[in-house]
């Protein structure tokens, strides 16, 4: 599940101009869905990479893609590990976004998530940054 909060609170260290051009995807808040789709959107995924979480992630990410958003940061800072279902959801979302001319970056990977991606040789498939700020800057650049 995506965490609901204000992007300026979540991205306090972003340059003020960048914080106005990035937002957290709050899932149920229609105001973000009507926001300019060219703005980077930060999706903070909930903890756990279990099949139940993967289904929730799939819904959130499908909504984003269907809404036409083309620049997405996926914050994995709260995720301890990734199972095959979660990896599949992330790969599918990345492919869907890239096919429509979009870009996705992954931020704040913990040791467990990074180890799974390294073991599965997917570490080079995803654009990975140490922080949300770096991901947003890369999408804006």
Image (cartoon, grey):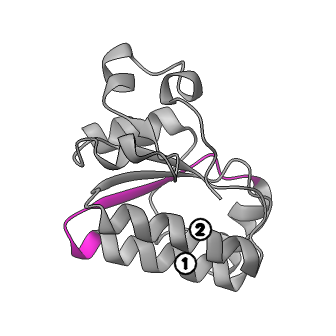
Circles 1 and 2: CB distance less than 8 Å?
A: yes
Q: Which mark is residue 115?
A: none
On whether residue 99 falls in the magenta region, the answer is yes
58 or 89: nearer the eye?
Answer: 58
Residue 11 vs 110, above or below: the answer is above
Q: Where in the figure is residue 103, as x and y percent of width and height?
A: 31, 59
For the point 56% across and 83% down, the residue is: 88
Disc number at residue 57? 2
Residue 70 rendering spot, x and y as whole percentages = 27, 57
**46 left or right of 95 in image:** right
Q: Which residues are magenta?
A: 98-110
Q: Nearer the viewer, residue 114 or 43?
A: 43
Crowd tier of the residue under label 1, counting other residues whose Cα lies within 10 Å: few below 14, some 14–19, many 20 or above: many
Q: Quadrant of the N terminus?
A: bottom right
Residue 63 magenta-highlighted: no
Q: Residue at x 74, y 57 (%)?
A: 79
For the point 74% across and 67% down, which residue is it? 115
The label on residue 89 is 1
Give coordinates of residue 66: x percent, y percent: 31, 69
Q: Element under label 1?
A: helix
Say left or right for 90 vs 30.
right
């Amino acid at each position: 599940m995506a965490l609901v909060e204000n992007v300026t609170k979540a991205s306090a260290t972003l340059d003020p101009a960048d914080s106005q051009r990035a937002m957290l995807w709050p899932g149920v808040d229609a105001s973000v869905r009507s926001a300019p789709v060219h703005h980077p959107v930060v999706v903070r995924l909930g903890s756990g990479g279990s099949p139940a979480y993967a289904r929730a992630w799939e819904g959130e990410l499908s909504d984003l893609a269907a809404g036409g958003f083309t620049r997405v940061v996926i914050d994995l800072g709260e995720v301890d590990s990734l199972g095959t279902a979660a990896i599949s959801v992330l790969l599918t979302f990345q492919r869907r976004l890239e096919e429509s001319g979009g870009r996705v970056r992954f931020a704040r990977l913990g040791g467990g998530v990074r180890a799974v991606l390294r073991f599965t040789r997917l570490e080079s498939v995803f654009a990975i940054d140490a922080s949300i700020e770096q991901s947003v800057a890369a999408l804006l650049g």
